[in-house]
Image: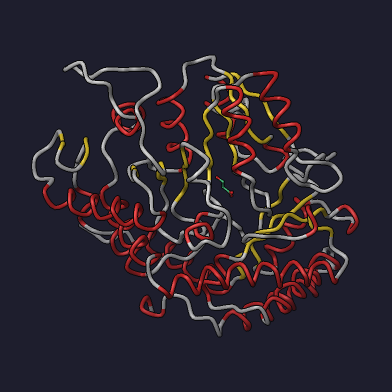
């Protein structure tokens, strides 16, 4: 078959784009070459509906081993009893988890999307807000911290079946213990979606949710630096809350309910090539090298936040505990939309983001979100944050000056040439 030069040329252009720019999207990262090789390998050809040792197709004896490796390594990373590595994404993980414990119309309580939450935590445009009855807590107006008192009073009033914690644009640690306390009081489960900070939690740099939240979901491609995908985990397995029995009349464990909700509940064949890549990434996370990386992520984020504050930028909650920060640009007289656009002209990639109590729409926004997982993988240290923040600031303060934008772009490209990305790819 003729090589598709059109598509491969676009892939080459994307590699060049990633190489020359400063990547500040908090949810992105650069996987290792071996993770990408697994994703582009022959396991993409295999159907394997079911689970290791219990498949609906023949020829699964090899993919059984990679999937079991992924499961075992993930359990080792977090020191937990249960992991399902089949969800195709974080959204799929959340859909399956909710399917396993909720009935349509059940009340759920999550952090409002416009306050840093996530679409799958009850947004009316998402399955979670359409199938279930969503309610929300917020962050406080003064400090930008999760309003635990509101969470508690809403939980007592609504009596949700599930309380969801975790966020996409929240830079502080979470008090899982406090959330579990009110959940127990009102008869709710707690699910922590750790898609963003999972890598820092893995290395003990942030509080662990496993002791307090019955269910934990994550993506695998953000701080975890693996392939795009999702996982569902439990610190401890337990008998299912509904007394569901299997064909032999045995009560099924919660792990069985979740497995069934992933397949056949919400997915068909698992992506075994991605699962092989997850296994590789999880192996990398177990190394000391990754521990050094995770600590550097946290230090870089703090250095970056300090550099922004020194230039008069308003960080929501006044700083960061994790890998990201959300900046309110209103005192800088530029919208998030425009900021994202002009930063793009200088080869700096970030995403506009609503800030709490924003007066602009989600398409315009008053804020911008910055994260350091990707630039830390490129090799940047605390000292480099000064260059990055200076470049961002110069762009934002000269947003309508094409000459300045082009000058910063050249400086960015020159700066990034010292942090080699995928040298093996030529
Ligand atoms: N889209 C992801 C993010 O950027 O945070 C969340 O799913």
Residue at image x 88%, y 59%?
Answer: 332
Residue 142 appears left or right of 270: right
Residue at image x 53%, y 81%?
Answer: 419
Identify whether 283 is placed above or below 123. Answer: below
Residue 274 appears left or right of 168: left
The C terminus, quarter of image? bottom left
Residue 372 sits in which quadrant?
Answer: bottom right
The N terminus, quarter of image? bottom left
The colour scheme of the drawn protein is secondary structure
- Near-viewer residue (128 or 158): 158
* Residue 326 image point, x, y percent: 73, 54
**Residue 232 in view in this figure:** no
**Residue 49 in view in this figure:** yes
Image label count: 0
- Near-viewer residue (287 or 402): 287
* Residue 236 image point, x, y percent: 39, 40
Residue 290 appears left or right of 20: left
- Near-viewer residue (215 or 2): 215
Residue 22 sits in which quadrant?
Answer: bottom right
- Near-viewer residue (231 or 426): 231
Identify whether 154 is placed above or below 232. Answer: above
* Residue 233 image point, x, y percent: 40, 43
* Residue 100 image point, x, y percent: 40, 26
Residue at image x 51%, y 39%?
Answer: 213
């Amino acid at each position: 078959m003729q090589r598709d030069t059109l598509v491969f040329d676009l892939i080459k252009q994307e590699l060049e784009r990633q190489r020359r720019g400063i990547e500040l999207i908090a949810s992105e990262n650069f996987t290792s070459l071996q993770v990408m090789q697994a994703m582009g390998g022959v396991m993409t050809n295999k159907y394997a509906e079911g689970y290791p040792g219990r498949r609906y197709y023949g020829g699964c004896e090899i993919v059984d081993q990679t999937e079991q490796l992924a499961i075992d390594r993930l359990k080792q990373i977090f020191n937990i009893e249960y992991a399902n590595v089949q969800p195709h994404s974080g959204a799929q993980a959340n859909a399956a988890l909710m399917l396993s414990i909720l009935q349509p119309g059940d009340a759920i309580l999550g952090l409002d999307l416009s306050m840093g939450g996530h679409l799958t935590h009850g947004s009316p445009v998402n399955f979670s807000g359409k199938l279930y009855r969503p309610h929300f807590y917020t962050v406080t107006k003064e400090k930008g911290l999760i309003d635990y008192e509101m969470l508690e009073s809403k939980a007592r009033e609504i009596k949700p079946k599930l309380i969801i914690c975790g966020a996409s644009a929240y830079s502080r640690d979470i008090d899982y213990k406090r959330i579990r306390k009110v959940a127990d009081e009102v008869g709710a489960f707690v699910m922590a979606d750790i898609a963003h900070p999972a890598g820092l939690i893995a290395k003990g740099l942030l509080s662990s949710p496993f002791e307090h939240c019955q269910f934990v979901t994550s993506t695998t491609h953000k701080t975890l630096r693996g392939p795009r995908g999702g996982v569902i985990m439990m610190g401890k397995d337990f008998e299912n809350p509904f007394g569901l029995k299997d064909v032999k009349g045995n009560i099924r464990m919660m792990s069985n309910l979740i497995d069934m909700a992933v397949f056949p509940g919400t997915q068909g064949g698992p992506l075994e090539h991605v699962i092989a890549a997850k296994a590789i990434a999880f192996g990398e996370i177990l190394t000391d090298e990754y521990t050094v990386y995770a600590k550097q992520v946290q230090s870089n984020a703090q250095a970056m936040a300090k550099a922004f504050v020194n230039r008069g930028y308003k960080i929501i909650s006044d700083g960061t505990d994790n890998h990201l920060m959300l900046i309110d640009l209103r005192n800088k007289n530029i919208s998030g939309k425009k900021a994202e656009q002009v930063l793009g002209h200088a080869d700096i990639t970030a995403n506009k983001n609503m800030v709490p109590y924003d007066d602009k729409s989600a398409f315009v926004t008053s804020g911008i979100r910055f994260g350091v997982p990707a630039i830390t993988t490129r090799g940047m240290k605390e000292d480099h944050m000064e260059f990055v923040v200076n470049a961002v600031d110069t762009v934002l303060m000269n947003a309508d000056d094409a000459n300045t934008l082009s000058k910063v772009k050249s400086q960015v490209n020159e700066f990034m040439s010292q942090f080699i990305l995928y040298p093996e790819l030529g």
